Amino acid sequence: MTHCNTDVLFEPVCLGQLTLRNRIVMAPMTRGFATGGMPGTAHVDYYERRARGGVGLILTEGTVVDRPAARNEPGIPFFHGAALEKWRPVAEAVHRAGGAIGPQLWHASSVESKTSDWAPESPVESPSGLSAPGFPRGVAMTQEAIADTVAAFAKGAADAKRLGFDVIELHGAHGYLIDQFFWSGTNLRDDAYGGATLKQRSRFAAEMIAAVRVAVGPDFPIILRVSQWKQQDYSARLAETPAQMADWLLPLVEAGVDVLHCSQRRFWTPEFPEIDGPEGLNFAGWAKKLTGAVTISVGSVGLSGDFINVFSGERSEPASLDRLVARMERGEFDLFAVGRALIVDPDWASKVQHGRVDELCPFDVQALASFV
């Protein structure tokens, strides 16, 4: 693996009044080790190790808000009720190790798990009673259910601030609830939360973000994870042009989002190559250009294989960071998120910073069976 100067990855960055020690974000990754929805000492140790290993900002695995059937696997942690105080020592441990942390608030909607046949006792809810275009599952949300869900996300965000977390992330990507409202294939509503345009279908997210902003105040950073692709359809695209992307993302930034966490399968893929060529801006680059928001890029950072291939058992080897460094040096995006590489190697950031790239670990699907 080639060595390159990685200094740009370790420059501090400010998110409002919060200063991060470097540009490295631990991506939120479902682990499923919360028995009964409760985080425990294993969660404290797991996140503390990554902070001690040099990560600047840790985003936790998806944690579910207080809605019936909000999770699609039994080991997904709650972020409500009795689980809340169990998250406080997680935040405190990360802070002791010099890192910052925020929970990712999540609602899985009608999406079934890829790894489990478990199903919640309550009917699953979604914009139009679909799990994917043309695939009915569960019930369509009433306007009352929509209002209650917005309130649940806002309360979760307020609780995160109260517990000492530094940021909050809302999961609006990958075909889950918020993203299902964006997607024309899963949002067939004929009320104010539907519509022919992406801007119209963004109303649910904008109302939620505005409610979260009120709940946490003006200075607490709000991150929104977004994606074009869906786990139901890897080729799906919400915005086919920069104008459509602006219509989608600008109202969300205006509603209160500070940071757009732009998920791609491969971070080096240009978003609109027909405009700026094969080395053009990626999703995070275009989102930053169009909205002025801080952006995080994510997608196969540090590994040779696409994460989607994990489900077929493919092994991924450590990969060069040359392309990442080049894009960071030209200011294309502000931060980048690392996923699987941090599952297998808590010291990934420290090894990169100190030139120990020959010690980086490959990723194998067997790593998902442990939580260390």
Image (cartoon, helix red, strand yellow):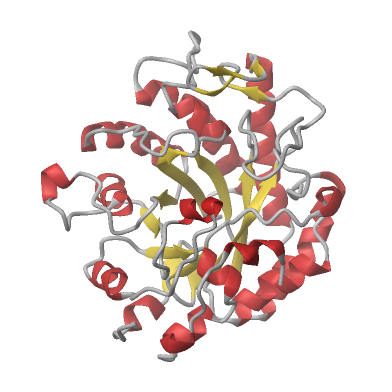
- Nearest the eye: 283 or 149: 283
Residue at the image point whose x is 49% and y is 46% from the top:
224
Residue 368 vs 73, above or below: the answer is: below
Residue 329 vs 187, above or below: the answer is: below
Q: What is the count of numbered marks?
A: 0
- Nearest the eye: 41 or 20: 41
Residue 351 vs 206, above or below: the answer is: below
Q: Can residue 219 be seen here?
A: no
Q: Position of residue 190 (x, y in %)?
A: 48, 8
Q: Position of residue 261 (x, y in %)?
A: 44, 52
Residue extending farthest top = 190
Q: Is residue 152 left or right of residue 226?
A: right
Q: Is residue 142 left or right of residue 227?
A: right
Question: Quadrant of the image for the N terminus?
Answer: bottom left
Task: Identify the image quadrant of residue 212.
Answer: top right
Q: Position of residue 237 (x, y in %)?
A: 34, 34
- Nearest the eye: 112 or 82: 112
Residue 93 vs 105, above or below: the answer is: below
Task: Identify the image quadrant of residue 89.
Answer: bottom right
Residue at the image point whose x is 75% and y is 69% from the top:
44
Q: Is residue 354 left or right of residue 218?
A: left
Residue at the image point whose x is 31% and y is 60% from the top:
333
